[in-house]
Image: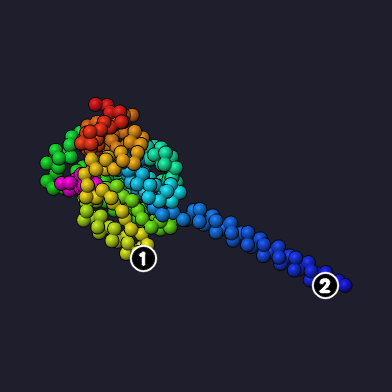
Amino acid sequence: MYLPVVKQNRDYDRRNIDFVYLVGFAFCKAFFLLEKDMKALVLFSGGLDSSVCLGLAVKEYGADEVLALSIYYGQKHKKEMTASKRVAEFYGVKRITLDLGEIFKDSNCTLLEGAQAEIPHEDYADQLSKTNGAPVNTYVPYRNGLFLSSAASIALSHGCEVIYYGAHADDAAGNAYPDTSIEFNRAVSESIYIGSGKALRVLAPFIDKPKAAVVAAGAAIGVPFEMTWSCYEGHDKACGVCGTCRDRRRAFEENGMTDPIEYEE
Ligand SMILES: [Zn+2]
């Protein structure tokens, strides 16, 4: 009489163990899907261009499938990190941050904290007239190459199939920022596509378009421009006179619009 009772108990224990394993597996699977199953990563500074990219990605895939990546790199305008948080919350997307400041600690780029020289308060065209074909002094050394590579690794870890990248033609004009050019984008996109086993591609919807086209695209889908931050200075209000403030204001004017953010001058 004793042995069958033991066997019965063992069967009962085995069923319990199987059930625990099943529940555990289902939980892990659900957790894996929640964490991994995203479609698009947006390289997201909190500026106007990347905010429009975020809006486009959400429109295409839905907020649950979009991951925003905001990178700190020692920039004076830390305010863009705050802007990126706000815009990501507006869209309801998951946002992750990455600190790459150490990589640029020896750079004398004027955009970075600790730089000796001031950020130029003039148009890019005027700045370029003095550089003899070299990038402007707010060019951060190979920043977008580094960012896209970092984004690729993170995107693959989250199962994404596309990286949105907000470079536009005005930034590349005159070799101001060579890592925003069509040639660069073609090369780095191919590199990421091949290096990811053809799992990941780069989408740069404005690579051959002026900033005015970025504003027009953003206006068409209701991007909250008032939450974005473009100025290179780290002041309370946008300076209005650095190269990127000038470009931004002009882009709105060309669309017959007024930029909703406040300027110092
Ligand atoms: Zn400015």
Which residue is depicted at the point 43% across and 51% down? Answer: 65
Q: CA distance from mark 2 to mark 1?
A: 57 Å
Let me know if residue 114 appears in the view.
no
Quadrant in which the N terminus is drawn: bottom right
Which residue is depicted at the point 45% across and 49% down? Answer: 64
Which residue is depicted at the point 83% across and 69% down? Answer: 5
Where is residue 170? Give x, y as percent: 20, 44
Where is residue 206? Give x, y as percent: 26, 48
The secondary element bearing badge 2 is classed as helix
Q: Is residue 157 left or right of residue 175?
A: right
Which amino acid lies under the numbered mark 2 shown in the image of this protein? Pro
Which amino acid lies under the numbered mark 1 shown in the image of this protein? Gly
Location of residue 80 by image quarter: top left
Where is residue 87? Give x, y as percent: 39, 39
Quadrant in which the C terminus is drawn: top left
Packing grade of label 1 (10 A; few <14, some 14-19, many >=20) is few
Which residue is depicted at the point 68% across and 64% down? Answer: 17
Please state which of residues 151 and 207 is positioned toward the viewer in this rendering.
207
Packing grade of label 2 (10 A; few <14, some 14-19, many >=20) is few
The region drawn magenta spans 168-176
The secondary element bearing badge 1 is classed as loop
Location of residue 187 by image quarter: bottom left
User: Vertically, is 100 above or below 228?
Assistant: below
Q: Which mark is residue 4?
A: 2
Where is residue 234? Give x, y as percent: 31, 33
User: Vertically, is 190 above or below 51?
Assistant: below
Q: Is residue 28 left or right of residue 118?
A: right
For label 1, the residue is 197
**Residue 167 within the segment the image draws in magenta:** no
Please state which of residues 3 and 132 is positioned toward the viewer in this rendering.
3
Counting residues from the N terminus, which is met first, the one under dot 2 or under dot 1?
Answer: 2
